[in-house]
Amino acid sequence: MKISAAHKKQHRVNAGEFLSDTDLSQIWRIESGALRIDSILADGFLHFVCLCLPGDLIGSELMTGFLGGIKVKAIVPTALTEMTPDLDETHLLLKNSIAQRWARCSEAVSLRSGSAPSRIQRFLLMLTNSRDNVVVESMLLELPNLREIASLVDSTPETVCRVIGLFLKEGMLHERKPLSVRVNSCNLRAYSAVDMKPGTRRYALT
């Protein structure tokens, strides 16, 4: 899809920061990082819908009337580029955005089914923006805090902490730091986390 490149505005969003309604009145392409979309329920609580990852578009919700019913938050530092489609491109942009969102919602369902290790493995692979035939070697991956990860994969911070510790022990992850870890997406994908059983040891990953 061709989008005008003239005078594109850049926007950086810190981890934990929500996009404002003004932000969401424009269309952005995610260049790096990750955003979570939550729907606002009638009682005011937020319900996780999906993640948006590099290459995805955000802001097209305005075009379909959903702006008032969602919250969008960066789960890691995120860089956005403003898109400025002309009238002829708007229909194609909306079509592509709907297809992207459908795929992301399908991925979100996978974060809520299966064992905790398998859910966390899927989440980490999503953050690498990995594809079946793409190998990302020695990638430093920025991570959300434990509470955020637990919310996304329907678990507890303690379980997430233990599972990440297990992945480190098994060589699926390397060089753990408080909010990052080094990943080889091929190695991470090669392991089956379905039957892994995390022990009781806790790791200081905040």
Image: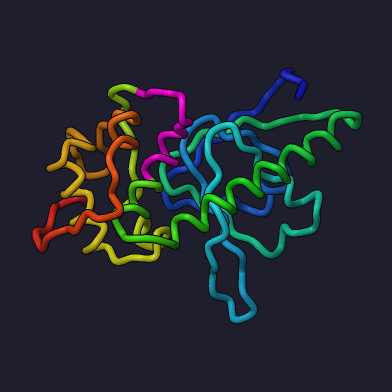
- Number of disc labels: 0
Measured from the top left, where is residue 205 in percent x and y?
A: 20, 50
Residue segment shown in magenta? 124-136
Furthest residue toward left = 201
Q: Which residue is drawn at 40% across and 47% down?
A: 122
Measured from the top left, where is residue 203 in percent x and y?
A: 13, 53
Q: In this view, does 34 lie to the left or right of 26?
A: left
From the viewer's perspective, is residue 130 above or below residue 134? Answer: below
Measured from the top left, where is residue 119 in percent x and y?
A: 37, 54
Q: Which residue is drawn at 82% across and 34% down?
A: 92
Furthest residue toward bottom = 43
Q: In this view, does 74 lie to the left or right of 89?
A: left
Residue 181 part of the magenta-drawn span: no
Q: What is the quadrant of residue 114 in the picture?
A: bottom left
Q: Residue at x 58, y 76 (%)?
A: 44
Furthest residue toward top = 6
Measured from the top left, where is residue 155 in percent x and y?
A: 33, 65
From the viewer's perspective, is residue 192 above or below residue 119? Answer: above
Instruction: In this rendered view, identify the residue nearer to me: 151 or 186.
Output: 186
From the viewer's perspective, is residue 31 above or below residue 60? Answer: above
Instruction: In this rendered view, identify the residue nearer to me: 94 or 11.
Output: 94
Q: Is residue 166 left or right of residue 149?
A: left
